[in-house]
Image (cartoon, rainbow, N blue to C red):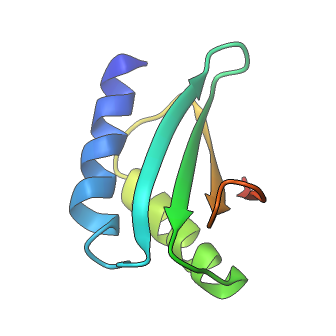
Amino acid sequence: MESTLKILNKLIEKFILPQYDDIYEYHITPRLDNNIIEITFWMDGTDQEIEEEIVDECLSVFSFIPRKYKVTFRFTTEGDNFYEYS
């Protein structure tokens, strides 16, 4: 899993962050008990359309690497409310 996390991190840094300047922080968290990798984006402001666009872009970029883990996405602006996509 460690190598997958490193690859996902590099892909986000290279392909996702440069496109979306509303993302000011992100965290990748493995959920080993159920083979899920959770990616949380902290946004400077967001709406559902942008969130869905980011998810689609991530899935497109991630499709080039073999994965045996499910990736879920969470978005938040202040850490109080999280909007989740899987």
Q: How many marks?
A: 0
31 vs 2, left or right, is: right
Q: Position of residue 12 (x, y in %)?
A: 33, 55
The quarter of the picture where residue 30 lies is: top right
The quarter of the picture where residue 51 lies is: bottom right
Above or below residue 13? Residue 21 is: below
Question: Which quarter of the figure is the N terminus placed in?
Answer: top left
Above or below residue 44? Residue 86 is: above
Q: Position of residue 7 (x, y in %)?
A: 29, 38
Q: Position of residue 19 (x, y in %)?
A: 32, 79
Q: Position of residue 53 (x, y in %)?
A: 55, 79
57 vs 77, left or right, is: left
User: Residue 63: in sight, yes or no?
Assistant: no
16 vs 28, left or right, is: left
Q: Residue at x 29, y 52 (%)?
A: 11
Q: Residue at x 48, y 38 (%)?
A: 28
Q: Residue at x 63, y 75 (%)?
A: 52
